[in-house]
Image (cartoon, rainbow, N blue to C red):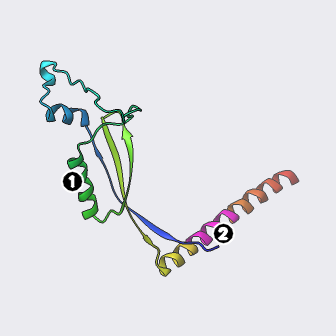
């Protein structure tokens, strides 16, 4: 079995917020006048309620295109229920170069050595207390 290394760079963290107000604006709801927006479900496909907010597709495409122009290749998103929106983290992933793998392995070995030294020190202190 081989190990494939990929490198991830966190490029951006941003959000799309207040999607409820965007929906109101899109359909001419004036919340200052206490207008309401009531959605009539007209589909047998929709069997489960959505936990998140609805994003207009063109807005989402523009947003994702802007992330792509910054070098983002992958995104993660989380629902932001406090602000009716989504939190996006944009990453650039690529197959690691040999030098990145070498550097990573060196850092990993160094970190393991530090942990070993700290554990030895802890055990030596414990042993010294036991000898008292």
Left or right for 57, reference 117: left
Q: Which mark is residue 113?
A: 2
Left or right for 64, reference 45: left
Q: Which mark is residue 62?
A: 1
Q: Percent position (x, y) of residue 75?
A: 37, 55
Quadrant assignment for the N terminus:
bottom right
Q: Residue at x 52, y 76 (%)?
A: 101
**Residue at the limit of the structure toward the bottom, as seen here:** 98
| Residue closest to the eye, 113 or 67 | 67
Label 2 sits on a secondary structure element that is helix
Main SS class of the magenta portion in the image: helix
Q: Residue at x 16, y 24 (%)?
A: 31
Q: Is residue 130 above or below residue 99?
A: above
Query: Of tags 1 and 2, which is closer to the observer?
Result: 1
Give residue 83's quadrant in the image: top left
Left or right for 78, reference 131: left
Label 1 sits on a secondary structure element that is helix
Segment tinted magenta in the rendering: 107-116
Q: Is residue 122 above or below residue 31?
A: below
Question: Is residue 66 shown in magenta?
Answer: no
Q: Which mark is residue 99?
A: none
- Within 10 Å of disc 1 (Cα), the crowding (few <14, some 14-19, many 20+) is few
Q: Percent position (x, y) of residue 38?
A: 23, 24
| Residue closest to the eye, 27 or 117 | 27
First of labels 1, 2 by sequence position: 1
Q: Residue at x 39, y 44 (%)?
A: 78
* Residue 126 is at least partly visible in this image: yes
| Residue closest to the eye, 122 or 30 | 30
Q: Percent position (x, y) of residue 80?
A: 36, 38
Q: Residue at x 39, y 34 (%)?
A: 51
Q: CA distance from mark 1 to mark 2?
A: 47 Å
């Amino acid at each position: 079995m081989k190990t494939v290394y990929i490198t991830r760079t966190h490029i951006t963290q941003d959000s799309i917020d207040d999607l409820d107000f965007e929906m109101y604006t899109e359909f001419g709801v004036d919340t200052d006048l206490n207008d309401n927006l009531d959605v009539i479900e007209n589909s047998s496909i929709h069997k489960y309620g959505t936990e998140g907010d609805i994003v207009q597709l063109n807005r989402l495409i523009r947003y994702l295109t802007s992330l792509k122009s910054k070098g983002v290749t992958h995104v993660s998103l989380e629902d932001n229920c406090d602000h009716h929106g989504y939190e996006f983290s944009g990453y650039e992933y690529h197959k690691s170069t040999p030098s990145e793998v070498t550097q990573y392995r060196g850092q990993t070995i160094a970190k393991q050595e530090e942990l070993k030294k700290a554990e030895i020190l802890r055990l030596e202190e414990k042993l010294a207390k036991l000898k008292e």
